[in-house]
Structures are given as structure tokens and as C-alpha cells.
Amino acid sequence: MLGCVRTIRGARGTRDQTPGGRYSQRVRTPPQRLTSLLLGLSPGLAVALAVVGLSCDSSESPCVEGRPSGVMLSFDDEPIDSWVAALPMFKEQNARVTFFVRGKTSIDLKLAKQRLTPLVAAGHSLGVHTWHHRRAPEEFEQDPQAYLRDEVQKPRTVLETLLGHPVVAFAYPHGNRSADTDAALTERFHLVRGFVTRAEFTTERELTDGGFVYSTSIDNIHHVSHQWITTQLTLVSQRRCTIWPVTSHEVGPKEWGILPEDLRWFLSEVRRLGLQFYVPEDFIQPNTAPRLQQ
């Protein structure tokens, strides 16, 4: 069976540019509908369209349970003290956040409990960010099994022992990925997260189906303006069941981080526009077991 994908995109803005906005949504056409469309064409044209791909509208809804649109905010690496310091800010806006922890933070379970328990106790989510924070394509190409064992499963085991339940999300270090790593990791995690400097939206249906998803950096280094962020959040609020994955690192002044006052503004802007905060576990269906392959 065949399916089709539609992508709608705009341009990215910075503090020095007029924000233009970008909207990216993959819309899958049900195979039965596409088959009936192709059967109505001449054989030659049907084959040609099947080969080059068919851009088309879809009756498939972006919704599953009809969740309100929102954001999926995450933080990467190991500036855990800054995350803990921001907990009152998250609580004030009822924001749920995912922290993708690099492995050396969790060298042993005792250290993981000491540093990560406050985040877990506050109701936030944890995800895997590898052990050594190396670029996935190169490491995977050298030895796929070693990469999955040492860089993926090793930190995952520590986190799952701490949490007492499966870890369902993984984030690529540096956003570096390949078709091979995507294939391997989406077999092991419900969501695999990338990293981009443009706005990429997704939908409740795509997050429920699972797989790869981009996340937009709002780090200081990218000089993202409040105006541009408001434009993107407004677009999200105008669409059904649409979620914007957004990422930073430290809560602080470093290039790879977000200033506390900017984070406070972002959280309040999400709420002002009536949007929700989501974590990957929200999109696990009760009758669907997370991917647990070793």
C-alpha cells in the first residue's frame, strides 16, 4: 500500500529579522483511499505517480483524542542544578517538561537518585541522551551493536531503574542522525527527537503513532526573538491537535541555554494563548506497550 506526505513550510525569523513562521505537518493519506485514486487513473500515470510520490489532501484527522494544541518543552545534557532551580517557575505555570539526560550524569544509580529525583518528584519526564554525547551516525556505523548497548541501553537502564517504568523517548546529541540510526532507535523508543533551528510542528496523531520528531532550539545562541516565538505559538493555537516541540539546555546565561527571564516569559506566553504542555508519555495509548527492545 502507498501513502503520501504533505509539508507546509515558511521562513525562520531572528531578533534582527521579521518573523515569518514555519509550519511543517506530515499528513498521511489512508492506503485504501490512495489505492482507489490510483485505480481511477490510466496504468501508466498511476505507476508514474506511485514512483515519484503523490502530493494530496487527506481526510485523516490530526487528532486522536482531540487534545488541545500545545508545546512539548525539553532540556538536554546535564545542567541539572539549573533545572532544579527552575522547578518553582515550571510549577507556577503548571508546565510539564522532559529532561534528556546525558549518561555521565547517571554514572551510577546513587548519583542519579541524588540529582534527578527532584525533577521526577515534581512530575516531569526523563529521556535518554546517550552516555558520552557523541555523534550518532559515526558511532553507529563503526559498531551498531556496541553503540546501542553502550550509548543507548546503558543510560536507559539507569533511568528506568530510578523511575520504575520504561523510558519512552530519546534525543540525538547535536541533532546528528542518519536513516540507519533512525531505524534502530525508533524500534526501541516511542519517540526519537532531533534538533533544528527552525519551527517544526507535529500533531497529536503523529506523536501517538510514534517515530522521529524535530524539536526547535530556543537557546540563547540562536537569538530567537519573543516576536517570532509568539508568531509560532499563535499558529499552533489556530490549528487543531498541533504540538510544537521546543528545546533548550541550561536555564541560564550560557550560549546553549535560555535566560530565566526568557523562560518565564515563554511559559507565560504558552499559557496566555491557551496552549498545553506535553511530555512523551502523554502520547502512549493504554493498549500500546512502549518499545522495549534491547
Image: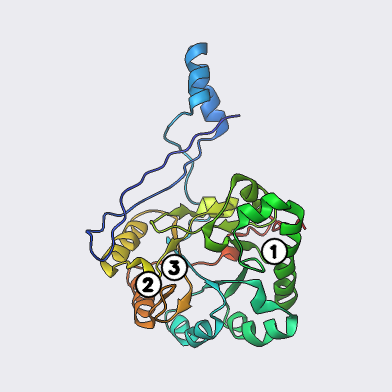
State the separation of the CA atoms marked 3 and 2: 24 Å
- Residue 174 % position (x, y): 52, 62
Q: Secondary structure at mark 1?
A: helix
Choose the circle earlier in sequence order: 2 or 1.
1
Q: How is the image coloured?
A: rainbow
Q: Which amino acid type is marked by label 1? A: Glu
Residue located beneath label 3 in the image: 276
Asked if residue 164 is positioned above or below residue 205 in the image, the reply reads below
**Label 1: how many Cα within 10 Å (few below 14, some 14–19, many 20+):** many
* Residue 51 can be seen, yes or no: yes
* Residue 165 can be seen, yes or no: no
Residue found at x 58% / y 48%: 178
Q: Is residue 186 left or right of residue 79?
A: right
State the separation of the CA atoms marked 1 and 3: 32 Å
Residue located beneath label 2 in the image: 220
Quadrant housing the C terminus: bottom right
Eye-nearest disc, 3 or 2 = 2
Q: Secondary structure at mark 3?
A: strand
- Residue 28 % position (x, y): 50, 39
- Residue 263 % position (x, y): 39, 77
Q: Secondary structure at mark 2?
A: helix
Quadrant housing the N terminus: top right
**Label 2: how many Cα within 10 Å (few below 14, some 14–19, many 20+):** many
Choose the circle earlier in sequence order: 3 or 2.
2
Q: Which amino acid type is marked by label 2? A: Asn
State the separation of the CA atoms marked 2 and 1: 28 Å
- Residue 122 % position (x, y): 57, 83
